[in-house]
Amino acid sequence: MKNYRENELKWYVFAYLLLLIGIRSNELFSIDNIDYLTNVEKLLPLTLLAGMICTLSFVFDCLYPVNLKEKLLFLKFITTMPGKTIFTRISEGKIDDVRFEIEKAQERYKEIINNMPSDKKLKEKYENSMWYALYRKYEKDPRVEAAQRDFLLCRDLYTTTITMLVLTGLGMKFNFIQFSCLPIKYLVAMLFITNIAAYFKAHRFVNSVISSDLINLKTKE
């Protein structure tokens, strides 16, 4: 499950390292600047610093608690974890997933829906616990595993991007790295892209558990 940290996430960080080096290399090795030996000497410290930023970003991401990652990703004032609203959305017919019929889901989880607390915080906790109980039943289902892996990858890409943005900003502020708008623009763009990707993958993951449960129910019938 976690092999994405050794593959996709590592290459994502490495791509940013190449971007930082590439920007500076393009400036140093221009047509008007032909003192290549001096330029190489100037490039080495930047390469080291860029490598440190990328390494620290990877390490710091491993240290983030899961709860902090979820808060950074979902930004509670905008949205919340889909597992906390899954049965509310089923009851209101606000799930568009071709893998199952919403009417069948409403019938299947009628008891859960009818027993939901009225208090918002208790309701979210209740829904998430009910969904998590279903997840534990189907966590080894290949469809659930694939959806969970995609979500975790996008989530970690997002939090790693935050770390790289902070470290890059600090590096430029204290003149460890020459200021350039391109890395900042790149990271901000990736911040939006990975957040949106993680949001959709989280819903896909939560819905995959429901889909597996309904398929299992249909097989028994």
Image (tube, helix red, strand yellow):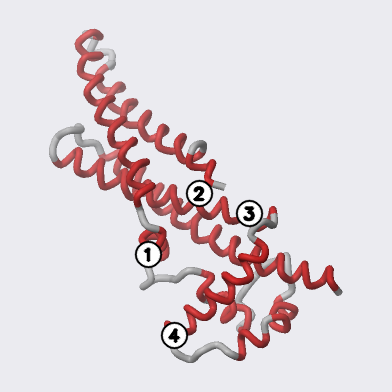
Residue assigned mark 4: 120
Secondary structure under tag 1 reads helix
For residue 71, the mark is 1
Query: Which of 192/135 is in front?
Result: 135
Q: Bin the neighbour count of mark 2 within 10 Å (Cα to Cα): few under 14, some 14-19, many 20 and up.
A: many
Please name which of the two marks, 3 or 2, marks the residue nearer to the observer. Answer: 3
Q: Bin the neighbour count of mark 4 within 10 Å (Cα to Cα): few under 14, some 14-19, many 20 and up.
A: few
Q: Position of residue 139 (x, y in %)?
A: 63, 59
- On the question of residue 142 being in view, the answer is yes
Q: Which comes before the other along the chain, label 3 or label 1?
A: 1
Q: Which comes before the other along the chain, label 2 or label 1?
A: 1
Q: Which comes before the other along the chain, label 4 or label 2?
A: 4
Secondary structure under tag 3 reads helix
Residue assigned mark 3: 145
Q: Which comes before the other along the chain, label 3 or label 2?
A: 3
- Give the spatial CA distance, label 1 vs label 4: 17 Å
For residue 153, the mark is 2
Is there CB contact under 8 Å for labels 4 and 3?
A: no
- Give the spatial CA distance, label 4 vs label 2: 29 Å
Amino acid at the residue labelled 1:
Lys
Is there CB contact under 8 Å for labels 2 and 1?
A: no
**Left or right of 173, for residue 114:** right
Is there CB contact under 8 Å for labels 4 and 2?
A: no
Q: Position of residue 146 (x, y in %)?
A: 63, 52
Q: Quadrant of residue 71?
A: bottom left
Q: Position of residue 53 (x, y in %)?
A: 29, 36
